[in-house]
Image (cartoon, rainbow, N blue to C red):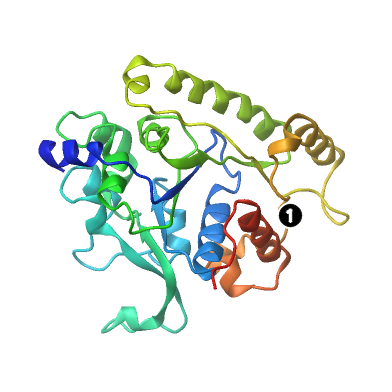
Amino acid sequence: MTSSTAARARARVLDKTRVLVFALKAGGTAKTSSCTSLATIIAQRGYRVLVIDLDPQCNSSQVLGYSTFRDGQLGITDVMKEQAELKDVVVQARYQVDEIDPEDPDAAYELIENLFIVPGNIDDPDIDEAERLLNDHRNADSYWIRDGLAAMDGEWDAVLIDCPATYGRTTVTAFIALDKAVDGEVLPPVLCTFKEAGALVRLEKKLHEIRTQRKYITKGIAPEVKRILACAAPNSSYGTKEHFKTLAELEDAYGEVLLPLVHWSGEMPKIYRDDCPVPIFAPNSMPAQEYNKVATALGFERRT
């Protein structure tokens, strides 16, 4: 994005798009499974949804049909290197329904209506160098996501961003997309263990640090946690005393902002084996039903 284009984008208000940033500095907290499940459900309810995969593991890209890229396909690192704009790398989400024919690999996939993704290419050598790319003055600045979304304002009803399990520059650029004019929030998925519950305190500390920096205050940037999603919650067939104790502590500390629980289920790991979000391959499963309740609690009622 050129400096003049960036300036015009920053002059716009991102007021037609809701932004949810899935972030927590802890690995395996269901960020990807929550992001892809909710994105699919929201799209199925009639909203145009964009997922941005910032995690170098590229798991959201895998689940939404892009475990491999076709020759010449652009991805998230091309935007970071300012070799493409955010809108140029958007592709429609999909899932595999047939054996792949090398002559026509796309024919093996079914497109997911209303759902799109800015994917990461797991085979791109730069995918593990995102922090270096974004710290290089020759590449995209801190506002690349904010500017890219502003340039597409009105194209998406909701944008869901899957972040890595760090608070490095990559994740911070997602936080910066949340200024006071944006209908958005940081939405941390938390497993019911003390480690992840403790990570919430560190997340709040990081967001407060951003909100109180002068360079962000002047731009109205104010990322905050408004709701919390407890995942892998214990039930009658799963969970130790530690899980139940942590869940009770979460409910006591965050009860007013805690979304409907998503309980542990053996269906969730299958999203990586099947390269498909759970609301599609198991629409009647417990996690699909519970993520539907979460989508409703977030205000995404089914459109008629």
Amino acid type for the residue under numbered disc 1: Trp
Residue 209 location, x and y as percent? Answer: 46, 18
Query: Compared with residue 280, is residue 177 higher up or lower down, i.e. above or below?
Result: above
Residue 192 location, x and y as percent? Answer: 73, 41
Query: Compared with residue 137, is residue 20 higher up or lower down, i.e. above or below?
Result: below
The residue that appears at 58% across and 67% down in the rendered structure is 302
Quarter holding the N terminus is top left
Say which of 50 and 287 sits in front: 50
Left or right: residue 112 versus residue 281 is left
Instruction: Identify the residue position indicated by label 1 in the image.
Output: 264
Left or right: residue 91 versus residue 141 is right
The residue that appears at 37% across and 38% down in the rendered structure is 177
Left or right: residue 131 versus residue 71 is right
Q: Secondary structure at mark 1?
A: loop
Quarter holding the C terminus is bottom right
The residue that appears at 60% across and 68% down in the rendered structure is 279
The residue that appears at 22% across and 49% down in the rendered structure is 78
